[in-house]
Amino acid sequence: MDINKLKEIFIEEANEIVEKLDVDIINFEENPEDKELLNELFRGVHTLKGSANSFGFTRLGEFVHHFEDALDFYRNSDEKVTSKIIDIFLNAVDLIKEVMFVEIDGIDGLPDGYEKSLLEIKSLLGNGDFVEVLNEELDLAAEFGNEEIGLESLKDKLLDDEKLYKITLTIDDDIYFRGFDHARFFQLLSQDGHLLESYWNFNEELNLDDFSTDKAFIKDIEIYLASSKEAKLIKENFEYLEDNEFKIEALTTTILEPKIKEQESAQEPKTQRNHRKNDAASFVRIDTNKLDELFDSVGELVIAQNFLEESEDILNIKNENVTKTINILSKITRLIQNRVMGLRMVPIQDTFDKMRRVVRDASKKVDKEIDLVIEGGDTEIDKTMIDSLSDPLIHLIRNSVDHGIEPTKNERVALGKSEVGTVTLRAYHRGGNVAIEIIDDGKGIDRDRVLSKAIERGLVSSDDELSDAQIYSLIMQAGFSTAAQISDVSGRGVGLDVVRSSIEKLNGKVEISSTKDEGTVFTILLPLTLAIIDGMLVKCENDTYIIPTLSVLESFIPKKENVHTFKNEGEFIDLRGNMIPIVRLAKILNTQTKTVSPTESTLVCIESEKGRYALLIDDLIGRQQVVIKPLGYALSSIKEFSGSAIMGNGDIALILNTEELFLPEGLS
Amino acid sequence: MTIDGDVLEIDSDMSITDVKELYLFVKDRLEYIEEIVILGQMEDWKTSSLFSLLVAIKKKKPSLKIPAVDEKFLDMGSFGKFYWKR
């Protein structure tokens, strides 16, 4: 495996560890008696240290090493971990993220705050002498002028099934005379595992004048061997030596491991331990590219299956066995499709857990006491979406903490609420989508203030009749901020519009509802996966197109009296009192051969970022889930399309990008 | 074993007999030798007496350069890293 591939694996694993550190620290703050959480933290940091050192990331290795010492101190002592110490831990995790960044990118120097955070970590050990105890064995390395080498780094080099052995050779000085040589033992040991290091201690009487090859001048040699073999098998190499001439010690169970194991056995029920072991054995790490390839192949399988089902040639075969076999094949294909789809789905819990830190930091900054409640963490969502969901969620939560929850406890109490504010993160399935709600029990959005600000900024006219939802959605317009005071947390006027566009990139949308003095709900609606969309198949000039159903409000054949044409402004449909512009798809795509009357066509009402419009098409075919295929380099610049899909009959249908089909008059 | 100017080149796979020869060669020429380097694969190493001799030489003439014992450690390939007590 080349170094870049290894580096990729390191980055992925290190990121997972660091993200978990954040979550574990916050959980530990909430459950300070749970020493197992400290053990988890310690194990994470220990693994990170090993990986960092093996890649030569010494700056990261050093920092993590001290952090590990501090965690080890607290897990092995009765010292209370105060909120201030939690702050130091969290700062250390932030620093680790930054050091990782400079290490991976090969940037010289240290990130700002490195020394400060390191000092803070070291200061936690100020009164303890455990470090000396722990490192007692390492003095050997120092004696040999090699302070950086120690047992810890040796242990980090062990493979899963290997133990670290210390073998001390104190062979009498007649070794050569007896026909042996230290070199021979090195050769034998190298066959039993991998030799890591050895420390040679020569006799003080060794000098050139008295040198002789008849006599050995070696007092002792300490050899460190990594081996999966048992000590008794290693011992066989020395069967011709006297018992006092060699000593074999297994070190892996003498220093760090027992601390972990002792605590595990004391505090963790046996069944839970077994469960973890099984968990580890049940998972396989798979490159997501391989999953994508598998998914593509299954997509092709589904298309081929659809072709079989729809082929007239096959339908004309009046044979019961053929029909039965095709039916079975169809069922198996759907089963495989569903299972492969499931491979990409992961519970949202981990992402929600990360938000605990966000709430903690944000609430401290604005000096509000806030609880985070998580519901529906087991709701599954496409892995690709999870990665893009963190930033929008962070922003919405910060927004709730900063602007949603009342500034003072008194204000809350006066409204009959508890002193502590609550932000709830909830995930659940809604129709064919995943809904994620960010709910706060704060003061709600000031509807009138939002509207007046929007009018002042020219975003809407005072004559416009807007629903509450439409007014609330104005706060997601670029540059819109009603925060009277710009804070560190949010309120810079950039952000909520970024949230909206980030969610739209995931083919999702954000809905807002709010009640004065009761709170606000931001609902993120996302498709289950980015690889398949629920689409409405439409016909236009004999071509088939797909409209993502998430953007479709309704479809209808208009009555003549509801269609209006305004000079220089185009066609409009009067939809229950609202004038909505009509957009002719064939005209937009330059495929129009004749101009048909809207009354002979179908209108599909679309909700887009730029407003509502009615898309004029020839006919509706139906609704279908389709596997999205990228357009490729040549077609990707055509903004009216966002992808393509292969239909059951083998035809290709283009997926319409509903955000790019309509440009309001004022913006054109 | 060859001497190139004031640099003595020795082989990593010296036997104990070779080491004895080396000792006899070096002890009378120590003042002319400025450096001793080991050539070849360290995994071919045959005897610990070689390192005893090199350490003894270094003790006798500290200014003589012997990278194998001067460096922080000697990388012996599959035999690991060798550290010398100073």
Image (spheres, coloured by chain):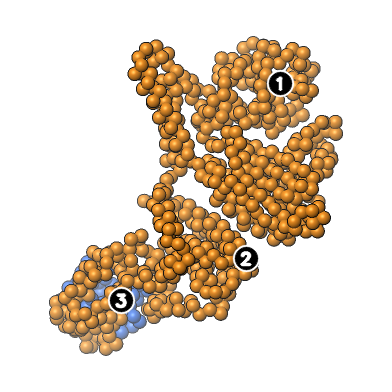
What's the residue type where badge 3 is placed? Glu
Give me the C-alpha separation between circle 1 and circle 2.
57 Å
Q: What colour has chain B? A: blue
Q: What colour has chain A? A: orange
Q: Element type at marker 2?
A: helix
For residue A323, which numbered disc appears in the image?
A: none
For residue A87, which numbered disc appears in the image?
A: 2
**In front of the other: A93 or B39:** A93
- Tell me what residue is drawn at x 70 percent, y 25 percent: A613
- Tell me what residue is drawn at x 26 percent, y 69 percent: A231
For residue A222, which numbered disc appears in the image?
A: 3
What's the residue type where badge 1 is placed? Ile
**In front of the other: B73 or A241:** A241
Residue B24: quadrant of the picture:
bottom left
- Of label 1 and label 2, which has the lower sequence position? 2
Residue with the mark numbered 1: A582
Near mark 3 (Cα within 10 A), the count class, few <14, some 14-19 or many ≥20, is many
- Are both tags, 1 and 2, on one chain? yes
Q: Chain of mark 2?
A: A
Residue A124: quadrant of the picture:
bottom right
Left or right: A172 with respect to A553?
left
Near mark 2 (Cα within 10 A), the count class, few <14, some 14-19 or many ≥20, is some
**In front of the other: A366 or A458:** A366
Left or right: A112 with respect to B68?
right
- Are both tags, 3 and 1, on one chain? yes
Circles 3 and 1 in contact, beta carbons < 8 Å: no
